[in-house]
Amino acid sequence: MATEPTVEEVQEKLLKVRREQGISETVKPIRSIVKKQLPEKWERPTICSIHNEPLDENWNCPKCIEAEKEWERKYEEEQKIKEEKRCKEIADNPEPLLINIGVGKRHLPCSFENYQGGEKLKSICMSVVKEPCDLVLTGNAGSGKTHLAVAIFREWIKNQTIKTKYDRDDFTLLKNAKFITVPDLLLKIRQSFSEGSDKSEEDIVETYSSYSFLLLDDLGAEKTTEWSITTLYTIIDRRYRELKTTIVTTNLTIDQIGSQISDRIASRLSSGKVIKINAPDYRKKR
Ligand SMILES: [Zn+2]
């Protein structure tokens, strides 16, 4: 009796069959290759051509099926290792993901290491890194509030709180965080109201409510329609209800947000941590 082929030998033979039939070697293994080996007119096979052993009642070879299963298991394991490696590479080099999330060139280098403001502010923000919560950073222009917010995002990428997931079904890279300035978001909302827009208001709300982490930069008292503000409130409110983390930077105090933008937005934002930055404009200082 011939010696039993090793798993590698069986897989090599299965691969050969795949190549001959033009089946991709990288797709997940397909069952019943034995059946596919057969020509149009065939006599019912009784013996596996690879193992020289009887086929079961469905004309499958139990050993081939076993080998396929083992192959699938190895494939899944390899994919998992690849995925872990990819995530680690992103964590070690946060810039590309920061860009992908929407952080502009100016704020790309912002980190806790190069923050020039107070140590106390820094340590409060670092506590938010450890325990994510809603946060409002309020202060005058150039006080470094966006710097701190981006530094928090950078740390979240480094510890893989903010991450991407490769969707094998539609070949897209999904991310769980977004940076957008409030004027840009209001613009998107206004555009969604216009006729012929490819995105509805609900699409915008859905998109910006779905990110686990959202940085709304530069909430100010720019002139905008009541409708846009209501939509902005809907996003902030939905995120609050779904326990999604929102960081807002603004040059207004909570009271000013209430009087100049919306009472309801002010009320939602005040439920999280509110940090007032009294720092001088360190952009001018440099
Ligand atoms: Zn077999």
Image (spheres, rainbow, N blue to C red):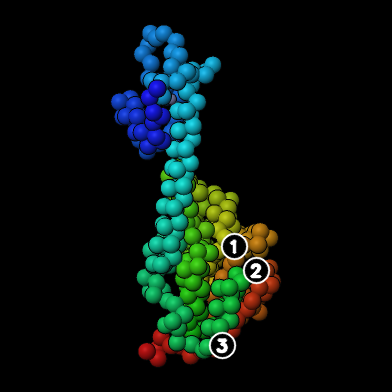
Which residue is located at x 58 percent, y 67 percent? 246
Q: Which mark is residue 210?
A: none
Q: Mark 1–mark 3 contact, CB under 8 Å?
A: no
Determine the secondary structure under disc 2: helix
The residue beneath circle 2 is: 265
The residue tagged 1 is: 232
Q: Nearer the viewer, residue 256 or 127?
A: 127
The answer to which image quadrant residue 44 occupies is top left
Q: Nearer the viewer, residue 23 or 7?
A: 7
Q: Amino acid at mark 3?
A: Lys
Precedes in sequence: disc 1 or disc 3: 3
Can you tell me whether the CB of the residue at mark 2 lies under 8 Å from the nearest atom of ligand 1?
no
Q: Position of residue 106 (x, y in %)?
A: 38, 74
Which residue is rendered at x = 41% and y = 8% of the image?
43
Q: Amino acid at mark 2?
A: Ile
Of the four image quadrants, the one with ligand 1 is: top left
The residues bearing labels 1 and 3 have C-alpha atoms spaced at a distance of 31 Å
74 vs 268, nearest the viewer: 74
* C-beta proximity under 8 Å, tags 1 and 2: yes
- Could you give the CA–CA distance between mark 1 and mark 2, rounded to whole angstroms? 8 Å
User: Depth-wise, is mark 1 or mark 3 nearer the camera?
Assistant: 3
x then y, percent, for residue 103: 43, 67
Task: Calculate the distance from the C-alpha at mark 3 to the C-alpha at mark 2.
Answer: 27 Å
Q: Residue at 54% across / 75% down in the picture?
A: 249
